[in-house]
Image: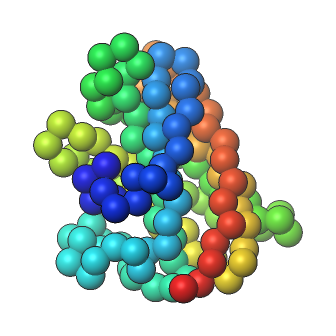
Amino acid sequence: MGIFASQVQAEQKADLGSWEVHYIAINSTFLTPEIAKHYGILRSKYNAVINISVLDKQDKTAQSVVVTGEAKNLLGVVKKLSFKKVTQGGAIYYLAPLSFSDLEQYRMTVNLNDGTEQETLKFQHKFYAE
């Protein structure tokens, strides 16, 4: 998982079409100041990072796709997720910041499109200010 190597145990996976989609939502304070600065991520106890990676199911190669999405809290407030593509060696990650309040739960809808295949990943996560 590269920049998120220490959080691998919290990572989740979904099989969507011909893809294996790995995703994780973590508090930005889990990132070192150097990594956060390098990727332009604001470290704050009220800021999370959504990390998506898409692999081919057959050969496990990283896939370059267009990633868009939104996060909706339980009150119905919707926040657009703006993903930034990060390439690290043979790996490709898509990172999006998300601000939150302590104990706030979000339902994420992430759209993946490579021009021929379109899939939607849905998951939810409760955030804690730490």
Where residue 43 appears, x then y in whole percent? Answer: 39, 82
Instruction: Using the image, determine if residue 92 lies above or below residue 20.
Output: below
What kind of colouring is applied to the model shown? rainbow
Judged from this view, the residue extending furthest toward the left is 89
State the residue at coordinates (49%, 66%).
Answer: 26
Q: Quadrant of residue 46?
A: bottom right
Where residue 64 appears, x then y in whole percent? Answer: 32, 32
Instruction: Using the image, determine if residue 13 lies above or below residue 102.
Output: above
Asked whether residue 77 appears in the rendered view, the answer is: yes
State left or right for residue 8 relative to residue 109. left
Judged from this view, the residue extending furthest toward the front is 9
Q: Quadrant of residue 3?
A: bottom left
Q: How many marks?
A: 0
Please tell me which residue lies in front, 51 or 111.
51
State the residue at coordinates (24%, 71%).
Answer: 35
Instruction: Using the image, determine if residue 71 lies above or below residue 87.
Output: below
Please tell me which residue lies in front, 120 or 60.
60
State the residue at coordinates (22%, 46%).
Answer: 87
Where residue 114 appears, x then y in whole percent? Answer: 42, 26
Where residue 63 appears, x then y in whole percent? Answer: 33, 29
Judged from this view, the residue extending furthest toward the right is 75
Please tell me which residue lies in front, 79 or 129.
129
State the residue at coordinates (28%, 77%).
Answer: 32
Instruction: Using the image, determine if residue 73 lies above or below residue 18.
Output: below
Asked whether residue 83 appears in the rendered view, the answer is: no
* Image quadrant in which the C terminus is located: bottom right
Please tell me which residue lies in front, 41 or 128.
128
Q: Quadrant of residue 122?
A: top right
